[in-house]
Image (cartoon, grey):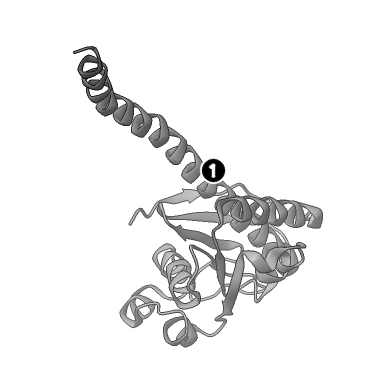
Amino acid sequence: MEREAGSGRPADGAVDHAAAGSAAAGVVHRLAQRHETLATAESLTGGLLAASIVDIAGVSGIYRGGLVVYATELKGTLAGVPADLLSERGPVDPEVATALAEGGRQRCGADWGVATTGVAGPEPQDGKPVGLVYVAVAGPNGAEVRQLALNGGRDHVRAAAVIEALRLLAERIHAADAAQAAAAPEAGSQTAAGATPGGAGTARAGRR
């Protein structure tokens, strides 16, 4: 499973709440086209991610459900994050975020899982600063986690985390589209190459 930790874009000032709706609409539309399903597993966002998704008309065709696992122990018991990982790393960790995404995906029986965990504030948590957030996506083409350093108050951090989680999901869906598009011509070439000798042989047989 691919696990990448990257640096997300900082977010300053007021969050454009319309951006969450636009990002959610994009992934819902694309997953509907792909006939694939989605699940969520949230910590600091506390259901905001799921709410952004279910605001989109027609979402029932792709959204399986979600887990809000605010308490650390529930990340293990409900979302399936390994207890030793939680004990060693704590809840705000890239590996935990990835495990949440995969756990939400598996527990809800979805093709894709997207997760959030971090520190919304107003105080640091377990030595982790306010605004440190991890968003992760697990899907048919592997998993990716992104680290974010978000500025602003508690509401801003939570809203920005939703937007970044949806953006990461959109990127992973796009990567899956690109991989499938690249594989399609290759498969077609192999089929054509395999059919050519047989076709020629049939033509020769007809001339005899």
Q: Residue furthest front?
A: 208
The x, y position of residue 57, in whole percent, is 77, 62
- Residue nearest the viewer, comparing 95 with 34: 34
| Count of all numbered marks drawn on residues in the image | 1
Residue 25 versus residue 114: which sits nearer the camera?
25
x, y percentage for residue 67? 56, 79
Q: Residue at x 81, y 54 (%)?
A: 18
Q: Position of residue 13 (x, y in %)?
A: 78, 52
Say whether residue 157 is left or right of residue 177.
right
Three-letter residue code for mark 1: His
Tell me: residue 78, above or below residue 130: below
In-front residue for pair 52/141: 141
Q: Position of 175 compared to 65: left or right?
A: left
For label 1, count other residues whose C-alpha is less than 10 Å away and answer few (under 14), some (14-19) or many (20+). some
Q: For residue 51, what is the image quadrant?
A: bottom right
Residue position for label 1: 174
Q: What residue is at 55 percent from the left and 69 percent from the top?
A: 39
From this viewpoint, is residue 96 visible?
A: yes
Q: Quadrant of the C terminus?
A: top left
Q: Quadrant of the N terminus?
A: bottom left
Q: Is residue 53 visible?
A: no
Image quadrant in which you'd find residue 139:
bottom left
Q: Judge whether 63 appears above or below 166 on screen.
A: below
**Is residue 106 left or right of 11 when viewed as pictured?**
left
Q: Residue at x 50, y 60 (%)?
A: 136
Give the SS element for disc 1: helix
Point out residue 120 in the picture as x, y percentages from the top left corner: 64, 70
